[in-house]
Amino acid sequence: MTATVPPKAPTFLGLPTAPRGVGHLRGDQSFPDAARGALRDGQLRANLGHATSTIRGKRARVVAEVPDWEQLRAAGKALKAATMARLDEHLEELERQVTARGGVVHWARDANEANEIVTRLVLATGAPEVVKVKSMATQEIGLNEALEAAGLDVFETDLAELIVQLGEDQPSHILVPAIHKNRAEIRAIFARTIPGVDPGLTDDPRRLAMAARQHLRERFLRARVAVSGANFAVAETGTLTVVESEGNGRMCLTLPETLITVMGIEKVVPTWRDLEVFLQLLPRSSTGERMNPYTSTWAGVTPGDGPQEFHLVLLDNGRTAVLADEVGREALHCIRCSACLNVCPVYERTGGHSYGSVYPGPIGAILSPQLTGVEDNASLPYASSLCGACFEVCPVAIDIPSILVHLRAEHVEAQQKPTAEGVAFAALARAMSHPRLWHLAQRAAGLGRLVSRGRPTLPNALPPPVSGWTRSRDLPTPPARTFVQQWTEEHGK
Amino acid sequence: MTAREEVLGRIRTALGSERTTPAEVARDYAQVHPVTGPELLDLLVDRVEDYRAAVLRCAPADVPATVRAALDQALGAGWAAGDVVVAPGLAQEWRPEGCDVDDDRPAVQLADRAASVTAVAVAIAETGTLVLDGSPACGRRALSLLPDCLVCVVTADQVVGSVPEGLARLDPLRPLTMVSGPSATSDIELQRVEGVHGPRTLVVVLVQPPRVGG
């Protein structure tokens, strides 16, 4: 490590979190600051509102037709919990099985190490470019930037990732990373960036998809190296799984000579049979389909069929620090379906970029701060109204609201200096435990009516530190008489 | 310390020395689909058609004619036998006359063909999913990927009801491809568009047993 690298954040049990200065887990701004711009963008809110309501409807329909949905959810939760409890053993078994079938397993402590491994493997093939299957793990570690820095061309092949890459944008959703763009904006990106694109290209989604097909076809056919993520990896058989829709994943997993898969260590499942649960939960929760168009599975190398060289990179990058937190570790159960984003009233209004991490929405609000250490994403545990809609739809029943509260507490306890909020709540606690003080305080609060001038809420231009609260919340005008005063008048002492 | 030892060590630290034994996972969800018999085939047809794929049903004796009809439907009546490539292990009598049989040519050359014909290993009715397992009858993975039209012949005994029933019949060591309708995307305004990189047309030939006593 050089002196320019910022010091690693202090962690739970001393386990390192995801390093600073690499990857996409931290934003430049706090959530409320980043969200302010998004909330003023009418086009963005219209695009998000349309897209999230569409997919909510689709999901609800296909989930409703499964009579044993709750049993599947409970099984998914239990399987994940059981896997985490023996995570080391399952990873060792996975390594044995993948190796036995001709694959090579690499271990990466963090994003830097994973990027170094993949870059070295690609350079060793002599190929000048790589094709990529959409993968959250490689987005998380900033792999594209690392490969480009080594002089390699990187082609994202998922339609939405392609839109993001060509638009020099950032993904804003786990499943549909270009959800913030509408068809007209996508047409404009394609017209500007795809060489030789039909000048008469319209914004019909079918025409846009065909333009992407044409653009990528030749790249698939000449590709020598592909990089993918993995949805699941079966320890007992060494079987990797990629779930997708377009066939770009199959192209990457099938045609090149070399396949490199980067997988978070939490993606392992113990047995083949476990997939019978997750392959029912994931598609219905994710795209709102009974089954996604294509699921590919492979175990090591198959002579005469697909890549003859296979590398599996097992990535930690803060996951073990998450595992160390007995409450927070449930965030590792996530199967990246994105149902929680689509139902979240906060996500629907702010969009994914406000979260500053590749993992946006409710799951991002509990995962990103744990991967980086809560001090590096301190505003995210508060980016929620705690309404609980995310918990309701989560296919593995992650109790996101409880973990949000847990992380808020962790953040508050980690403060060195007293905060205005902390002082206010300490004063409130004292007042509420002394009846005389409480009554005085209530009467004093009644003075707030003087600044409200008859309106139902107080003006949001109150002086600091109160402005920190009222900037994003309405403070109701105090009533003329307190509850206790009314009660006393009507019922006597 | 190697990265392997360090990551495994971190996991052990995180889990602590007194690990709880994981609770037994209750698999009280449905293992089998309640529908059976001819209704099971109807369910498969309904679910496959819902993905905007076509299904042609036929008796065992009519498979060759139905495969030709499927190709007529997908490619137009003027297709040539050389446009079509079939899996090397596809039953001889199911193959269109004069068609190309896949061999060990470079996989990318399959992109020149208009259509491929394969068998399947399993079909899952509830989700309308066909599973190809890389066996000679299903062909290698590129065969069902590169030509723009895929015709799959499914026999009634290969149809199961549920996802658990389907996975139980499969070998996880083979390269598997689960196909549910044609290639599709919903990346633009969540509007489904069929046909991106995989085959844009999927036709299923469903071979039904002759009706007993009928």
Image (cartoon, coloured by chain):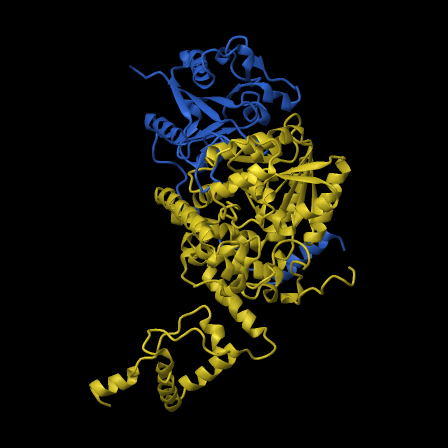
Chain colours: A yellow, B blue
Q: Nearer the viewer, residue B92 or B18?
A: B92
Q: Is residue A50 left or right of residue A486?
A: right
Identify which residue is drawn at 48% across, 75% down: A467
Q: Nearer the viewer, residue B40 or A36?
A: A36
Query: How many circles with numbers are drawn on the protein?
Result: 0
The answer to whether residue A272 of the structure is visible from this angle is: no
Q: Quadrant of the C terminus of chain B?
A: top left
Which of the 4 image quarters holds residue A230? top right
Q: Is residue A440 left or right of residue A368?
A: left
In this picture, is A217 found above or below A321? above
Identify which residue is drawn at 65% across, 19% down: B104
In this picture, is B74 found above or below A320? above
Q: Is residue B95 left or right of residue B49?
A: right
The answer to whether residue A139 of the structure is visible from this angle is: yes
Q: Quadrant of the N terminus of chain B?
A: bottom right
Which of the 4 image quarters holds residue A166? top right
Which of the 4 image quarters holds residue A470? bottom left
Identify which residue is drawn at 59% across, 63% down: B18
The residue lying furthest to the front in this view is A199
Q: Nearer the viewer, residue B196 or A181?
A: A181
Residue A191: x and y in percent read: 56, 37
